[in-house]
Image: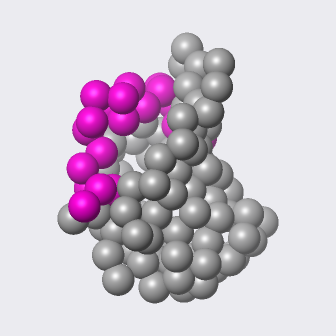
Amino acid sequence: MGWTFERLNECLERRYVSGKNLTLAQFRIKAGCTVPAHSHENEQISLVLEGRALFVVGGVAREVSAGKVVHIPPGAPHEVRALTDLVVVDVFSPRRDDWERGGDSYLRGEGPSR
């Protein structure tokens, strides 16, 4: 088992590793960038390691800083706005097989924006 590292665009880097039932990911997002609204079948728990972000989950906005956790239920629309340079660790269950199939276009090219 090893990390997969990707620079998805000028705003966002991701590394992740998957087990049988979950995916662990670390994102680095530059200040001023946004991961646009999207949803997925996976339950997600996000831990902000560094920086501050505005998480919008199901239409409810919440500012989150280092050490805080956000729960995103399966199917809930959500987006993340980096208020400062940001490091976030995400745990997903079930695992993010869609990433390996290229189902993450919202994160690439047209993805996170300023």
Q: Is residue 38 left or right of residue 26?
A: left
Residue at the limit of the structure toward the top, as seen here: 20
Look at the image and say whether residue 21 sits in the magenta stretch. Answer: no
Residue at figure coordinates x 56%, y 25% from the top left: 18
**Vertical arrangement, residue 68 with respect to residue 104, above or below:** below
View extreme (right): residue: 67
Asked which quadrant contains residue 74, the reply is top left
The answer to if 97 sits in the magenta stretch is yes
Give the x, y percent position of residue 41: 34, 36
One can see residue 85 in this view: yes
The magenta region covers 91-109
Residue 54: x and y in percent read: 51, 78
- For the point 35% across and 83% down, the residue is 114
Location of residue 104 in the rendering, given as x and y in whole percent from the top left corner: 30, 45
Please tell me whether residue 75 is drawn above or below residue 32 in the rendered image. above
Residue drawn at point x = 58 percent, y = 63 percent: 28
Q: Is residue 12 left or right of residue 69?
A: left
Quadrant location of the N terminus in the rendered image:
top right
Q: Nearer the viewer, residue 39 or 34?
A: 34
